Image (cartoon, rainbow, N blue to C red):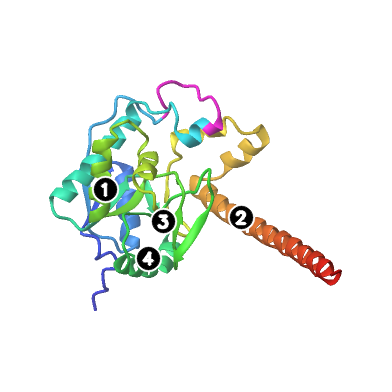
């Protein structure tokens, strides 16, 4: 008996690559086969004049600059942004309703994807949405606001190696680009175009290579922390960062709630004491 296609709600699944015969593409095909995604088509692009996404020069002022993607839009980023926008235009003009766009170093986690995918597709099928990122990282704002099982709204996330666009999302993205043609890193551009940005919670798709700006960010952290981070794969970093920030956020909320409760209790006692004095 043939297994149902859990990705059937997506008309087109497109992968951006410069070399259709590369080891990256072969590894991605194997990974997608294991999550039962069998309809990937390649969007072959010319190699950028800049080898890596490291900005217009080799120096980055501070970590905040990297997080905000300020002054780091070099030829590679411009080319990549153009590739993503051309896919959105072609898919929209073809009449596609929902699409998935992958970069060729994407890699779905088998266990997490199998557990989350039915809930994600059920939610996407029954709600209005523009963009859904399978591998977003909430950085520097680590807040995932749950709106469904394994679905959350995240503020200004990084990474755009694995995401879905609805037809409404494609239209909104293309219109936004017409009004705001300023060059950006594509993940930053998405956060500007989509105020309500949906993502997998937790992330279920990662990258087999470390993004260049992430490697630059490592140069700005303390040496001991840098040594520990370099031992991790990018997937391990993303997973540990996600759970660390979620636990920390939960602790802060609990502490803040407790403090508010204590203050309200003290205020109530004072008001009662004051009222009894009359």
CA gap between label 2 and label 3 equals 18 Å
Q: Is residue 109 above or below residue 227?
A: below
Which dot marks residue 249? 2
- Which badge, 4 or 1, comes first in the chain's sequence? 4
Q: Earlier in the sequence, mark 3 or mark 1?
A: 1
Name the residue at 46% across, 34% down.
213
Q: Are marks 3 and 4 in contact (CB under 8 Å)?
A: no
Crowd class of label 2 (few under 14; some 14 to 19; many from 20; radius 10 Å): some
Give the number of the mark in front: 4 or 2: 2
The residue that disc 1 covers is 172
The residue sitting at the bottom extreme is 1
Q: Residue furthest right?
A: 277
Residue carrying label 3: 199
Tags 3 and 1 touching, CB below 8 Å: no
On residue 247, which mark appears?
none
Q: Main secondary structure of the magenta part?
A: loop
Nearest the eye: 174 or 107:
174
Residue drawn at x 45%, y 59% is 152
Sequence-first disc among 2 and 3: 3
Disc 4 marks which residue?
Answer: 120
Which of the two discs, 1 and 2, labels the residue nearer the N terminus?
Answer: 1
Q: Is residue 32 above or below residue 77?
A: below
Residue 130, percent across and down? Answer: 31, 54
Locate the C terminus and report the quarter of the image it occupies.
Answer: bottom right
Q: Nearer the viewer, mark 4 or mark 1?
A: 1
Q: CA distance from mark 1 to mark 2?
A: 32 Å
Q: Which residues are magenta?
A: 54-64
Q: Quadrant of residue 180?
A: top left
State yes or no: residue 58 in magenta. Answer: yes
């Amino acid at each position: 008996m043939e297994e149902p296609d859990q990705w059937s709600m997506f008309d087109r699944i497109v992968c951006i690559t410069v070399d259709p015969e590369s080891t990256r593409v072969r590894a991605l095909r194997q990974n997608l086969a294991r999550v039962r995604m069998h309809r990937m088509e390649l969007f072959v692009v010319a190699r950028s004049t800049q080898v890596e996404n490291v900005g217009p020069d080799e120096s980055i002022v501070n970590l905040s600059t990297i997080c905000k993607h300020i002054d780091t839009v070099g030829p590679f980023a411009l080319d990549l942004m153009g590739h993503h926008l051309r896919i959105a235009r072609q898919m929209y003009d073809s009449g596609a309703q929902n699409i998935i766009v992958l970069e060729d170093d994407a890699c779905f986690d088998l266990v997490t994807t199998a557990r989350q995918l039915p809930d994600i597709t059920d939610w996407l099928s029954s709600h209005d949405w523009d963009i859904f990122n399978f591998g977003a990282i909430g950085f520097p704002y680590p807040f995932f606001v749950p709106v469904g099982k394994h679905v959350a709204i995240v503020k200004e996330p990084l990474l755009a190696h694995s995401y879905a666009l609805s037809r409404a999302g494609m239209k909104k993205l293309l219109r936004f680009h017409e009004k705001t043609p300023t060059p950006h890193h594509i993940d930053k551009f998405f956060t500007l175009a989509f105020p309500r940005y949906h993502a997998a919670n937790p992330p279920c798709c990662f990258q087999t290579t470390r993004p260049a700006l992430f490697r630059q960010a490592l140069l700005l952290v303390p040496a001991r922390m840098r040594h520990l981070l370099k031992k991790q794969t990018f997937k391990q970093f993303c997973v540990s960062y996600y759970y660390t920030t979620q636990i920390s956020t939960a602790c802060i909320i609990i502490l803040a709630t407790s403090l508010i409760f204590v203050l309200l209790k003290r205020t109530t006692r004072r008001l009662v004491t004051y009222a009894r004095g009359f």
